Image: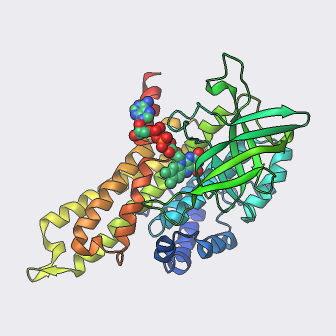
Amino acid sequence: MSTDTTRAPELTEEQELLQQTVRDYVRNHVAPHAAKYDEAESFPEIPWAKARELGLCAITIPEVHGGTAMGTVAASIVVEEVSRVCPSTAVTLSVHNSLVSSTIAKHANDAQRQRFLPNLASGEWLGAYCLSEAGAGTDASDQQTTAVRKGDRFVLNGAKLWITSGTHAGLFIVFARTSTAPDLAKRSRGVSCFIVERATKGVSIGKKEEKLGIRASPTTEVLLQDCEIPADNLIGELDKGFRIAMDALDVGRIGIASQALGIAQGCFDESLKYAKERRQFGRPIAEFQAIQWKLADMATGIDAARLLTRRAARMRDAGEPCAKEAAMAKLFASILANRTADEAVQIHGSAGYSREYLVERLFRDARITEIYEGTTEAQRMVIARALLG
Ligand SMILES: Cc1cc2nc3c(=O)[nH]c(=O)nc-3n(C[C@H](O)[C@H](O)[C@H](O)COP(=O)(O)OP(=O)(O)OC[C@H]3O[C@@H](n4cnc5c(N)ncnc54)[C@H](O)[C@@H]3O)c2cc1C
């Protein structure tokens, strides 16, 4: 019987073909380099260049703007497959495709889509999403970055923190406070959404974080100092950008659920292989019930996480509200990824504690999935809010 639990009957022919293409890409262009980039804490240049060539950064962009318009399920498949081996490359693709490109495709006007999407589709520009600040984490509405209208321009000032791909991004989606009216100043209603091109005067990259995991995904400060952008770079309505930030996070969370799912799948694959090879007491450790039960629990959790993630992705593609379902998928898959990575290290014994084995890196990389794009606690808040009405 097949142990490939990633097969799912509901994938279309096009999606299955994509899955196969991404598996080949991962085998040939990601796996050989992933440990090296992690060790050096450097951006995954070779995987990113090949991803561009294969059109993996065009998946959520309409064809008319140079994309392949394959949608959220397809983007989820890409992130899942890449995360089995390199969660750093996977989050680079996830932020680019989900948080950035699909948000511009959905919320920008025609002229803006025409200006920004072709460069994102080709990968000429890598996209970054700038919501977090020193004081705006889980409470993302407490934005201190400001955007002040000056004629036909906005002038932005502030510091964004923890920005994925900061060092390499060519385009930033930036959220900033545009209203200081007393009733709006401390609330989500006075926040607007802007596009800032990297080449704009006043944009600089601050401190790069040294991290526990996803070390090949550069996380930086993005500083905006008297940064003047055309007023045409305002996405959506003035003072109403926070709802765009939250809508972007719905689709972003499907991406992180996919990343967590891929990490769990990678841990399972490695554990199954190792359990059959490693012999103790004169037989493979896979023959011990203690190991078999771990494998059974891992596989069951992975199937459940995949069903939740694909459900949320399909709802997004159908244009249905999916905040609750995306949060459920991320909540479940991220906890599962950490538990599965922990069990994978245990099955590997001392080998699992060594950098020579993939599960060591996946164990470190799993941890972030419970933190970014809303912590585990934040997902529970979103779900509970939806349940309570
Ligand atoms: C590697 C990495 C990449 C990132 N990439 C990006 C990016 O590209 N763009 C971006 O904008 N941000 C990014 N972030 C930021 C990330 O999304 C935030 O760090 C995250 O939302 C948590 O915010 P915080 O760190 O300020 O935690 P805090 O909000 O300070 O939370 C601390 C703890 O308190 C809990 N908590 C807070 N409020 C409540 C509450 N009301 N009820 C219960 N518990 C609560 C939290 O769950 C958490 O456990 C990234 C972060 C990291 C580490």
Return the residue found at the far left.
281
The way the protein has been coloured in the rendering is rainbow
Residue under the image location 48 percent in, 46 percent down: 311
In the figure, is residue 227 to the left or right of 37?
Answer: right
Residue 278 found in image quarter: bottom left
Could you say where residue 342 lies in the image, as x and y percent from the top left? 28, 60
Number of numbered callouts drawn: 0
Looking at the image, residue 241 sits to the left or right of residue 5; the answer is: right
Relative to residue 336, is residue 2 depicted above or below? below
Residue at 23% in and 68% down = 347
Q: Is residue 284 above or below residue 256?
A: below
Residue furthest toward the top? 183
What is the residue that sits farthest to the right in this orientation? 151
Q: List x then y, in percent, for residue 88.
A: 51, 64
Instruction: Tell me residue 242's x, y (percent).
Output: 65, 33
Q: Residue at x 62, y 49 (%)?
A: 99
- The answer to whether residue 66 is seen in the rendering is no
* In this rendering, position of residue 255 left or right of residue 189: left
Q: Is residue 74 left or right of residue 387?
A: right
Instruction: Judge whether residue 40 can be spotted in this image.
Output: yes
Quadrant in which the N terminus appears: bottom left
Quadrant for residue 158, please give it.
top right
**Camera-side residue of 14 and 167:** 167
Q: Residue at x 30, y 55 (%)?
A: 339
In depth, the one of 82 and 143 nearer the eye is 143
Give the x, y percent position of residue 344: 28, 65
